[in-house]
C-alpha cells in the first residue's frame, strides 16, 4: 500500500455522518465526506476530463495566481500544479477532500505552490486571481439563485481585470428527468423542501453501501448565462462539458476521443454538463 493510501485510510468519518437529512436541508459537508472517504469519487472520476483540462490550460498559461473553488480532492488542481508555474489557492467546503488533496500535493513535492483558503479568509486575497475555476457542479450545490449569484459576484471581485472564470454545471435536459418531474409536482403542492426553485432536485447515491443525499440545481443554458451576466461577467464560450456521461469519458480513452468529436458537433444545450468560459471585462 502506498504512503498516500495509508494516510487517507487512517482518516476518520465523523459520527455526524450517520445522521439522516431532513427534506428541508442538506448536509453538504457530510455527503461529500462520504463520497470522497468511500473512494467512490476517485473510482468514478479517476482523472480530469481531458477536453475540460485543455480549456483550462488554454486560459491558464500566463496565469500567476489561480483559485480552484470547490477543488474537491484535486482532480484539476494537481495537473495545474504539475503543468503551470502558477500559485494555486484552493477552497472546498469538504475538509476531508482538501486533506486528501494536500496529501497528494505533498507526495509530489509541490506544496510550496498551494495556498489553502478557509471560509474566513476566502475573499480576503490581496493579490487578485488571473483565473478562477468552479468545475463539475460546484455552483449547482448552492441552494437558491440569489446565493449563487452572490457567490459569483464575490468571485468577480477577486479577479484581476480581464481575468477568467471557468465553471461547469449539470444540464437539466440530460439529468434526473424523473426526479425533476417529482420535485415539480412537490413544488406545486408546496412540499418540495430545499428543492424549491425550478431545476432543483435532491438525489441519492449509494456510497460504500450507504444511501447518501445530494442537492443539485440543474441548469439550462439560459439560466446559467443569466446568473453569470448578473454577476458582472461577459461570457466568451458556452459549450458541452461532455456529451457522454462524465464518469464514462474519464475512464475510457476511446470515449474521451469520441466525446471530443461529439462536443464539437453538438450544441451546448445537449451536453451532459454545461461549461462556460467568462471574463471580467475592463469597464
Ligand atoms: C462534484 S465535486 C467537484 C470537485 C472538483 N472540482 C472536480 O472536478 O473533481 C463538487 C465539489 O464542490 C464542493 N462544494 C459544494 N458546495 C460548495 C461550496 N458552497 N463552496 C465550495 N465548495 C463546495 C464539494 O465539497 C465537492 O468537493
Image (tube, grey):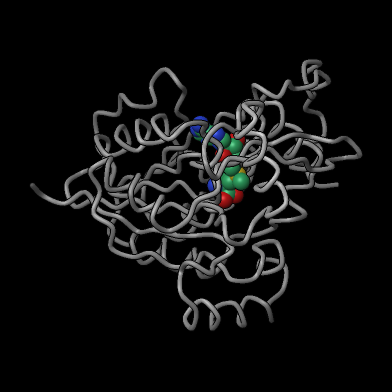
**Which residue reaches farthest front?**
189
Residue 218 versus residue 166: which sits nearer the camera?
218
Residue in front for this viewpoint, 12 or 6: 12
Q: Quadrant of residue 141?
A: top right
What residue occupies the far right of the structure in this picture? 209
Q: What residue occupies the far left of the structure in this picture? A: 283
Depth check, front residue: 252 or 10: 252
Q: How many tags in the picture?
A: 0
Image position, residue 134 (x, y; %): 46, 46
Image side of residue 81 versus residue 23, left or right: left
Location of residue 191 with respect to 200 vertically, above or below: above
Q: Is residue 246 left or right of residue 9?
A: left
Q: Position of residue 85 (x, y in %)?
A: 37, 54
Q: Residue at x 28, y 58 (%)?
A: 235
Above/below status of 201 relative to 131: above
Q: 231 or 156: nearer the eye? A: 231
> Can the viewer see residue 135 in this picture?
yes
Q: Quadrant of residue 83?
A: bottom left
Residue 158 x %, y %? 27, 36
- Residue at 16%, 47% in the rendered image: 161
Judged left or right of residue 190, residue 39 is: right
The residue positioned 71% from the left and 31% from the top of the image is 31
Residue drawn at the location 65% of the way across and 47% of the way down: 180
Whether residue 74 can be seen here = no
* Quadrant of the image where one finds ligand 1: top right
Q: Quadrant of residue 61?
A: bottom left
**229 on left or right of 42:** left
* Residue 220 image point, x, y percent: 47, 56
Amino acid at each position: 500500500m502506498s504512503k498516500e493510501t495509508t494516510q487517507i485510510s487512517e482518516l476518520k468519518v465523523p459520527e455526524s455522518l450517520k445522521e439522516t437529512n431532513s427534506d428541508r436541508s442538506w448536509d453538504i459537508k457530510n455527503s461529500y465526506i462520504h463520497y470522497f472517504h468511500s473512494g467512490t469519487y476517485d473510482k468514478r472520476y479517476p482523472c480530469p476530463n481531458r477536453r475540460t483540462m485543455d480549456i483550462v490550460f488554454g486560459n491558464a498559461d500566463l496565469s500567476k495566481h489561480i483559485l480552484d473553488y470547490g477543488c474537491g480532492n484535486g482532480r484539476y488542481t494537481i495537473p495545474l500544479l504539475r503543468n503551470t508555474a502558477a500559485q494555486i489557492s484552493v477552497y472546498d467546503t469538504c475538509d476531508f477532500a482538501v486533506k486528501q488533496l494536500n496529501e497528494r500535493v505533498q507526495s509530489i513535492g509541490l506544496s510550496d505552490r498551494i495556498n489553502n483558503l478557509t471560509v474566513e479568509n476566502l475573499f480576503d486575497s490581496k493579490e487578485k486571481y488571473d483565473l478562477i475555476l468552479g468545475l463539475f457542479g460546484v455552483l449547482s450545490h448552492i441552494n437558491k439563485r440569489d446565493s449563487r449569484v452572490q457567490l459569483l459576484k464575490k468571485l468577480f471581485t477577486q479577479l484581476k481585470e480581464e481575468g477568467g472564470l471557468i465553471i461547469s454545471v449539470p444540464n437539466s435536459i440530460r439529468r434526473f428527468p424523473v426526479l425533476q418531474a417529482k420535485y415539480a409536482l412537490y413544488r406545486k403542492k408546496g412540499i418540495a423542501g430545499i428543492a424549491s426553485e425550478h431545476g432543483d432536485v435532491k438525489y441519492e447515491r449509494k456510497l460504500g453501501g450507504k444511501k447518501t443525499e445530494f442537492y443539485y440545481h440543474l441548469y439550462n443554458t439560459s439560466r446559467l448565462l443569466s446568473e453569470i451576466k448578473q454577476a458582472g461577467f461577459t461570457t466568451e464560450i458556452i459549450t458541452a462539458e461532455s456529451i457522454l456521461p462524465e464518469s464514462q469519458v474519464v475512464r475510457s480513452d476511446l470515449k474521451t476521443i469520441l466525446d471530443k468529436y461529439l462536443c464539437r458537433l453538438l450544441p451546448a444545450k445537449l451536453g451532459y454538463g454545461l461549461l462556460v468560459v467568462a471574463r471580467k471585462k475592463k469597464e
